[in-house]
Image (cartoon, rainbow, N blue to C red):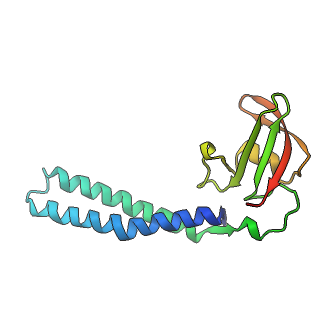
């Protein structure tokens, strides 16, 4: 299986979610199933069916997170030499050449991406256009709304 890049912060967030699911949610759901069973006839027992559905979701999510962590290539950007190049994990400040609008993005793995928090998937068109470029470079990136031109203002290893 192919290794998937992930920041150390992203891996830690997944580990915390996994611990929550295993130590809190799973026992709570198991108790809810046991309590619903005590009510008798399982065919028409809505609490039982709801708890079983929650159990399926919880177990699926546990398997999903364990799979992601086992295939993760965790990259700690603070341990990589600063070259001014845009690479996975860096925080990059870009300026829209047409509008002078400044944007700050951290380039992260697919599972960590959250554009509202400034976390840009390494596989997104903007990140693909920035990777390998350096501070001071001007890049043209094809976006759904047309080609945009950005200047790479700053590359930080945060």
The quarter holding residue 59 reads bottom left
Tell me the quadrant of the picture where the C terminus can be found: bottom right
x and y, in percent, of residue 67 in the image: 53, 67
Which residue is depicted at the point 14% across and 63% down?
37
149 vs 137: above or below: above
Q: Going by the picture, which residue comes out furthest to the left?
A: 40
Residue 2 shows up from this direction? no
Q: Position of residue 94 (x, y in %)?
A: 80, 42
Q: Residue visible at 78% across and 50% down?
A: 92
Residue at the location (79% across, 35% down)? 142
14 left or right of 79 in image? left
Tell which of 118 and 88 is nearer to you. 118
Q: Is residue 78 left or right of residue 82?
A: left
Residue 76 image position (x, y, % from top left)? 71, 68
Residue lying at 66% horizontally and 66% vertically, measured from the top left: 3
x, y (%) of residue 132?
Answer: 85, 54
52 or 95: nearer the viewer: 95
150 vs 158: above or below: above
Q: Quadrant of residue 39?
A: bottom left
Looking at the rendered image, the quarter that the N terminus falls into is bottom right
Residue 89 visible in the current orientation = yes
């Amino acid at each position: 299986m192919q290794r998937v890049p992930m920041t150390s912060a992203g891996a830690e967030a997944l580990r915390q979610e996994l611990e929550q699911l295993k130590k809190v949610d799973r026992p709570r759901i198991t108790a809810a199933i046991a309590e619903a069973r005590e009510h008798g006839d399982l065919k028409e027992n809505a609490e039982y069916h709801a708890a079983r559905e929650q159990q399926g979701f919880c177990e699926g999510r546990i398997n999903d997170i364990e799979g992601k962590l086992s295939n993760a290539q965790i990259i700690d950007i603070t341990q990589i030499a600063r070259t001014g190049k845009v690479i996975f994990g860096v925080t990059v400040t870009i300026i829209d050449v047409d509008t002078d609008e400044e944007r700050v993005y951290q380039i992260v793995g697919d599972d960590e991406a959250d554009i509202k928090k400034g976390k840009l998937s390494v596989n997104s068109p903007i990140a693909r256009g920035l990777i390998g470029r350096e501070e001071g470079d001007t890049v043209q990136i094809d976006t759904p709304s047309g080609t945009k031109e950005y200047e790479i203002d700053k590359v930080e290893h945060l």
